[in-house]
Structures are given as C-alpha cells and as structure tokens.
Amino acid sequence: MPRFQTLVSYLLLVIHTLLVFLLIFQEKVTIPSWLQPIGRMHPALLHLPIGLLILVGLLWVFRKEFEGVQFAKIFGFILSFSAFTAALAALMGFFLSREEGYTAELLNWHKYTGIALSFLMYGLVLLHQQYAYLKALFNIFLGSSLIVLMVTGHFGASLTHGEDYLFPSKNEENAPLTFDENTPIFEAAIQPILKAKCYQCHNEQKTKGELLMTTIAGLLKGGKNGPIWVANDALNSHIIQRANLPLDDKKHMPPKGKPQLTPQEVGILTAWIQNGADVKKTLKALAANDPLRGLVEAFVKKASDAPSPQPYTFEAASESTIQKLNNPFRVIFPIASNSPALQADFFVRQAYKPEQLGELSEIKTQLVALNLSNMPIKDDDLSTISKLENLERLNLNNTDITGATLSKLDGLSKLKSLSLSGTKVSTKALQSLSKLLQLEEVFIWNTEVSETDLASLRKQNPKLRFELGHVPKPSEILKLNAPILVNENFVLSETDLVTFKHPLHGVTIRYTIDGSIPDTLSSPIFKTPFKLTNPYTVVKARAMKDNWYASDVIEIPFFKGTYRPSSVELLKEPNPTYKGEGSHTLINRKKGDPNDFKNPAWLGYRESPFEALFTFAQPTPIKIVTLSLGINIGSSIFPPTSVEIWAGSDKNNLSLVQKIQPTAPQKVEAARIQAIESQLKEGKYGAIKIIARPIGKLPEWHSGKGQPGWVFVDEVFFN
Amino acid sequence: MTSIPQKDMKEFLENRFNITRRHFLGKMTAGIGSVALGSLLVPDLFKGSSDDSDTLPLGIPHFAPKAKRVIYLFQNGAPSQYESFEYKPLLNKMAGEELPASIRMGQRLTGMTANQAKFPLVGSKFQFAQYGQSGMWMSELFPNIAGIVDDICMIKTMNTEAINHDPALTFMQTGAQQGNRPSMGAWASYGLGSENKNLPAFSVLLSRGKGNGQGVYSKLWTNGFLDSIHQGVVFSSGEEPILYLNDPAGTDRAARRKMLDNLSELNSMAFDDFGDPEINAKVQQYEMAYRMQTAVPELTDFSKEPDHIIKMYGPECLVPGTFAANCLLARKLSEAGVRFVQLYHQGWDQHGNMVGEMPLQAKDTDRASAALIKDLKQRGLLDETLVIWGGEFGRTNYSQGTATQDNYGRDHHPRAYCTFMAGGGVKPGFVYGETDDFGYNIVRDPVHINDFHATVLHLMGLNHEKLTYKHLGRRYRLTDVAGKVIPGLIA
C-alpha cells in the first residue's frame, strides 16, 4: 500500500473513533473556543467530499475506459482522499453543531446522515483494499454513499438557506390580511415586523441566542440573556437597546448584513412596549390621540398599500385566449403585472358588434372590470353580462339600456361599482340593486332620477353611494356663442352662397343684410344658404336658444366683383414694409384681416397717399366702384381723410367723379373692414383712378397724437 | 437584397445585425471578461430575480393602479399662488416693507429683478375665503374651483430648481431642465401603452389665455429617446382638432385599406433590409391613423353633449382652441381611454399688471377646470383619472418694479408654489405641506418635482425606479436618480 493511503487509513481510523466517542458523549461535550473557527469552516470544506465522491462514482462507472494497474492506484488514491475529507467535514460539522442556534430536528438529521456518510466512505476504502473478494459489497456501499450524500446535502442546505429555499411554500403568503379596530396591535403590526426582520434567525429550526420569536410563549420567555422587553420601559428593553446600537456593534440587532428595522418599525416597537407590551391589546383600546395609534395605522396602511398582487385566487387566462380576444376595439389587459384579473374596454361605437360581448365568456372567471360606455348595449345584453361572475366594476354609461332588465345583474355577487350615467334607467329599476350585496357606488348622472327620487333611493339603500352629479340650475342663463360663418372667402362669385352654423344643437340663427341688428322676433331665420346681390353687403347674425341669452352679433362684410381690370398701376409706392404683392394685391380677390396688417393682402400708405390706376381691356359698363379698407385705430390705421374717384375712357382722359370724406373716428374702435362705394354715371369706362389720403396728424385723444396715420387697402371691386 | 451592389453589402449587413465586425469582437472580449469579473463582484448577477427592472413587462402596470389615466391641465407661465390658492394675510399687513434677508436667504433672482434695489412685499388684491368641509382657502378669482375643494388635493409645497420658464417647464414635463428627455406622457405611454389602440396614448391640447404669455414647444411633449410612437400628438386648435382625417375626395375606405396594406408590405421589406425600428413605428402610426378615422369623429363632435354640460364648462367650450373646449375634449379623450392628455394654457406670466390679467386668466380656466372634475366624477371616472392643475414654478411675494395703489407684478419664484390634483387615488379635500407666513420658504412636507413625478407614476401603477430605458450606455428614468413617492398625498 502506498505511503499516502497508509497514512490516510490511520487518520480515518482515528477520526472515526473520535466521532463515535463524541456521538456517545455529545451531551457532555463542550467545544473550546479555539476549536470554534475550525467548526465554522465546515460549510467551506464540505464541498470537497461532495465533488470527490461524485468523481469516485464517475471513475468507477467508466473504469473500463482506463487501462492497466495505474488506474486502480489512482482510483484508490482519490477514494482515500475523498473519505478523509468526508471524515474531516463530519468532525468539523460536529463541532459546529455544538454552537447555539441549531437545536432542531433538522440539524439531527443532517448530523447523523453526515456521520453515516463518513462511515460509509471509510467502509469503501477498506472494501477497495479487499476488492477482489467483495465486489458486490463495494458496489452497494458506493451506491448508498452517493444517495446518503444527496440526503445529507439537502438537510445541510435547508439548515443554512431555510426550508422554503428550494420549494417555497405558497399557502402561507398572500393571505389577505384585514385589520380593524378589534385586531390586536400585536397581530397588526408587531408580529409582521418581527416576521420580516427577526424570524430568520430566531425560529424553531434556528434559535440563535436561545431566543424563539415565532411564538408568543417564546417571546415572553426571552433568550439566554433573559426577556427581550420590559413592559412600559422601552429604554431598558433589550430588543430596543440592541436595535439602537451602532450598526457595527456586535450586539446590534438585526446583525449587520441582514435587513434592518426601519425607524418607523423601531418607533412602533418602542411605543408598543412603552404602552405595556400587551399582546392582546387592540387598536380600539387606544385613545384617539395615542401616538401608537397613528404609528400602527400608518404601518397597516403602508403594508396594505405595498405593491402586492391582488388576492385573486382564480387561475389566469391563457396568453393565447387574451391575445385572440384582443382587437383595437375590444382591449383586454391584466389589471396589474402578474395579476390574473382582467379588464375589458370597448371603444368606437361604430365598430361595435353584438357578438363581441358574448365572446367574453371565455374569460368570464378572470374579468373583473368591463367598460362598455357609449356602446349600443341593449337590455337583452345584460343577461350576457350577468354571466361574467367575478365582475367588480361595470361601466354602462351612455348605453342604450332602459333599466327594465337591470335585475338580471343580481347574479353579479362581486359587483362594487356600477355606472349608469346617461342611460334611461328609472328610479324603479334601480331598486333592484339592493340585491347586489357588495355594491358600493352607483353613478346615475343624466338619468331620469331626480333629487327627490334620490332621497328615497338613499333611504332604501343606506350603504350605497349614489352619485347624481351636476344638477343644472334652471336659473342659470348664460350667453350663447356667436354663430360661425362657414364661408372662408368674403369675396363671393355669382354662385357663392352664405352659410352659417352653430356647434350647439337646437340653436336658431337670425340675420340681417340691411345693417340693422338682428332681433329675436322679426329678423329672418337662417335655414338654408342664401345669395347676396349687392357689390358690398354687411351681414349681421346672432344665435338664440331658449334658456340662453342671445349671442353677440357678428358682422361680416361680403364683396362681389363683376369686372376685372386688365392691369393695375400703383402711381404712388406703398410703404416698403407693407407692400403686399405689389399692384396685383388690389385685384387678387384676397381679403386681409384688419388685425393682421402684416398679411400680404394689404397695401399700407403713410408718407404718400394711396393712388392707383386701373385700366380695362375694353370699355366696361361699370356702375359702382368699391374700395375695401382696413381700419385698426389702435395701430394708427384710420379711414382716409378723403377718397377721390376719377374715371374716363382711358388713363389720359380721366375726370373726377366723386370726392368722399369718410367720417373720422372719435375714439378707439374695434378693428374692422370698411368699404367706400362710389356710383358712376351710366356709361362705359376704360380707366379708373382712386386716390385715398391718410390722415396727416393723429387726433389729440390718440396715443400717437400728432404723428401721421396710415391707410390700408386690400382690394378694389368694380361692378 | 439582390439589387444592392456588392460593395455596399457589408454596410447593409452591419446595419442588419446592428453591429460591425470590430464592435462584435470588441464586445466579445470585453463582454466575457466583464461577465466573469462581474459575477465575482456582484454575487446576484445571475440570480435572475423577478424583481429585476429588465424583466418587468411593458404595457401593464407594475401593480394595481389607482389612476388609469391622467389629464394634466398645465398652466403655462406660472400662475401666482398668492392670488389663487395661497392665503398669506401677512403680505397685506406688511405691504411695501422690504422682504427680510432672513427669509430670502440668498435665493438667486432672474434677470428681471436681479437689479431691483428694493423687494417690497405685496399682498393679494383679491379676497380669500374658506370653502367646503375641508375649509380650504381660495381666492375670489376661482369661484368654481372653490365649489369643488372637497374633491381636490392641494399641494402647497411644490418646488423646483429652475428660475426661468424654459428650463422650469422642461423640468416639470421631462424631469430634466435640459430638454432631451421623454415627457411624462411619453413615459406613461411607454410604461402602460395605449388603452384605446385607436387613439394616440399621449395627446396634447393647446390654448392661449389673455395674459402675458410664454410659448410652448414640441420638446415639452417629446418622446426623447423613447420610440417615436410615444410622442405627444398635438391636436389642432382649429375647428377640426385632427387635420386631414377625411379621405380625400374619390378615395373610399377600401381603397385606403388596400393602399395601406401595400405600403406596409413595402415597409416591412425595408425593415428586413435595414432593421430600423422606426420603420415599424411608422407602420403602426399609419395603422392608428386609419383607425382614428373611425374613432375621432365620435370624439370631436360636441353636438351630442347636453346643454347643461355646455353650461357647466361654459359656452366658450364650443369655441375650438379655448381652454374650455380643450377641457371638454380632454374629458372625451380620457373617457375614450387616452392614457395621458396634456393641456397647456398660456398667459400666466404676470410680471406686471397682476390686477388686470389675473382675473382674465382665472376666468378662462376656473369654470372649465372645475367642470372637468365634476364631469369625470358624475360618470364614475374620477376614481381612475388623475387631474393635475398647476404651472412650472411660483411667483415672488414681493413686487416686480414698484407696487402702486392699483397694480403690481410678481417675478418667478422656485422655492414654493401650488399645484392641485383630483381623483386618481389622491386624498380629496386635503392640503399637503405648508410654507412660512411669507409663503417664501417651505416649513413642512416639501414636494420636489422629482417626488411629484414619482408619485404620479406610482398612482398610475408604475414604480418610478423600475420604469427605465437604456440610452447612451445607462438606464434613464423620469425621475432619473432622485425622487420618492409621497405617501401623504395618496388616499
């Protein structure tokens, strides 16, 4: 036998003898402190025999693939060494087991199986030396060793990682906790804190410091240093003292590296101990202003607010079912990540098909919220909905139901919220809701239900919250919006019609074309689009409706142009900033906005008068010349002081037809379009010249007094 | 691929695999080394815990949400807290006196008042009273909001770092002052997806008040580095909120469908070649636009709203592009499952003429804001819809320029301002936080913008620390590296 193996077999004999001795006298053995570190190396060393024994097994299974005597030697060498490490691990494990905190059953199992493994492997070494005679026995020992290895390994891992590590048990978690005034504070707050931060080391399996915290008896008994709290004296209670020690202190609890108590938790523990540390005391027994009450309430609230999956117990629907039912108009989604509960929303009334509701039966267990608002849901559909047994929220706002079949929903035993706003449900129909025991709120705004009905409904169902919403005050009368002109162009062709509209339904629009203010009685009512005949017409319109004040009057100037000159010449250049599109600006049929004088529809004059010559290809029977001006007093754009119209057969034969002096404004007025019209004598004209002079000095009352004013022209029409 | 010349093939292939040869080799060596090293240093590296942020599914809340949707009534320009919700009678008592240095404590000032020699305190010209069972203080300018105080949760202690509009707005909307990060709505869309697949998950509505205003820019509703389907979709403030919704004359639905099918076929070929995810985003957007053609007309048609609803919001709600119209549209969008509706109402920047402009701004918003909350409530939607009302910072307790008998102005103030929320799981009829008697500093329960974001995401069922997106080599969050949920706001 090689030297190494001889040495190992002696050592094995010694260690195993020692193990037998220690096992027999284990109750009397105390481990000296210098040996403790060796014991604590057990978790590191134990991996050596695990790996080696598996290697031994593998070599043995594949032994045919090796050749010659060397294999037997090497195999024997590895086997001896693995047995030696196993024995050493077992011995160290024994030392460790004598330390505090491992008194439980699990530890015993690990201890005995571990030592058994060590003996089995010792046996293997001995058998291998006599292999020629005891082949079968060697195989049996090797097989058992591997099995015992797994068993003891599992027990050991359970000791260090906890029994729940490999297969977490589910039944304990997620139990919905409900707290009320009658829940003992101990259960509501103290136990959850201890569970989260202390149980890990102070449980039945691992009872560090001989302190068992999972039971009330264990807590009251305390650990090896005595009771952990002194009722009414938090500052002298070990649990509080230790929690308040610096983190690096050896006695600080929970130990460094473990989840620590939060200040809030320490606060609750302190206050509770100060309050007497009574495990039966309930919230009810506390005064309303007791600080403990606030702490506990905040804690309980926080715990229930913690993002945890809803306590739904049903199975989740399959991914493919949800995907199949999902489309752009019927959206189905889980209410939260990892929750089996689903919500379904329907969108776009036009896209609704009645069968889409029935198809939800595939997820009738999982569906907890259904939004059908604005869909054409009929009374009969409620029986389909009633099959969705777990529904909690149902939105039927603005659907076509009448309420006649509302009692069909009686089966929805979990329904909490029902929205019926904007439907035809009656007070009578709502009475059937009393059968829905879980129902908390009903929305009945914009239904037939009146405030008096509501009072009786509330009396019948005191637990229900009926939301009637905004009840309009009949006395409240507001001013309507002005009508909206549909036409975009204020220059009408022969076929163009004037059209108004109003966004509110049931509004009457009255208008005038004679400059008067439309009144509520006699002015024409706008029914169909109408035609205008004059070259220049100001249309005034306003909207009216019962229970509303009539709107402001809108004034829209319309222009018509029958003849178009063949050319325009600006005899005086406009101000360079407001030169529009040149001379063409005047006949391009583009109207400007008097508030937007930077628009190229405008020509602006200040230093020189507006002076333009219009020539026609052939003599034209013009009767009326219309000059369209922009007036914006605030921006110093005034009516001209004078307008001269010159007309003749051509540009060299012009004579003054009319000189008009528009009235000058006396105060700041709203920006507007103003037209100046001039009648020509009957005849045919080949050229027309117009001169409009800006005001030289703005009047005293104007902010720009003394400075020259502007004239703005956008268009000239010939009819 | 046959049409691609040989010399370009390498580039195309690299693009397809989204990696070059050098990158690949580089990543290989670095990758194996770092995995080995990492596993030694971070023992949990291969644990694959289910808590890991990477594995949280997108499109579903992390936990059961209180608010399924958000309507954010953003008051752009910073409404003055002293004329709205923050009652500080001391300012009236001490009007004209200098702001004590012990209160200002070196607060940096904007360029507009930095050179001002004096900081005379000025009190509200508008009366305050207590309303509702909660006894919340409200200025006379907000009579309708005063009527619903028992439904709202008023935060008095919002605070930010920015002192100018652009960085402050950007901070409020994206969680960073610089402006390349996704907006809140984009994060919500990214985290929760769209409830209604026929409408954009993040919709933006703009309106302009009568007061001195600041503009809004598309960077406020950007998707940032997120996929572009999360970008805010701006509705037009004209008569047709969504332009070009109708098929052009001569095109029927079937033809449109066929065109889209063929287009998407071409696009998917392009995607096979280039692997650019934006191509797929584009296809999805075309499809959504097609469905929007059916879904939107129902929403933008106000003619079926009963008269008393119109009266509740105020008749301006019939004028497209007003705040009231946007509130009504917001309700309809939210009711139809739009995850995040963001309104911006401009004109709240009262550096001067507080007395003239504040009532106009309040009148624009008060009635419709209150109506929106009441309207959601009566439909049973307030529980699941979070309404937020507030600006980007507060205003100073001293006057910008000299305060006259009749008028004054207030500069920007970042240390404390008011924002209120309603529904969606916040405490109703509740005031959170407290400022000192000058309203200048917070004395209790501050809510930083990051905290506010964390809380809003929490209400939507999202863990702000786990809603992340990896970009430029690191994970980003709306709250980036700060922010904590404020449990005190949650019912």
Image (spheres, coloured by chain):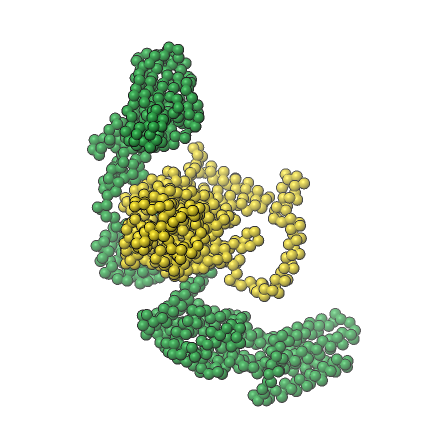
Chain colours: A green, B yellow
Residue placed furthest toward the right: A68
| Quadrant hosting residue A581 | top left
The residue under the point 29% across, 23% down is: A662
Residue A230 in the image: above or below residue B71: below
Image quarter where the N terminus of chain A lies is bottom right
Residue B165 is at least partly visible in this image: no
Camera sees residue B53:
yes
Q: Quadrant of residue B358?
A: top left
Find residue B437 and report its horizontal and vertical position in percent: 34, 57
* Quadrant of image for the C terminus of chain A: top left
**Residue at 62 percent of width and 49 percent of height:** B19
Q: Residue at x 29, y 21 (%)?
A: A661
Q: Position of residue A283 (x, y in %)?
A: 34, 72
Q: What x and y, as percent, mark residue A277?
A: 39, 78
**Residue A717 found in image quarter:** top left
The one of B265 and B206 positioned closer to us in this rendering: B206
Q: Position of residue A400 (x, y in %)?
A: 31, 48
Residue at the front extreme of this rendering: B117
Is A556 situated above or below A129? above
Q: How many marks?
A: 0
Q: Is residue A480 left or right of residue A226?
A: left
Say left or right for A705 vs A209.
left
Rendered view: B35 above or below A28: above
Q: Nearer the viewer, residue A376 or B269?
A: B269
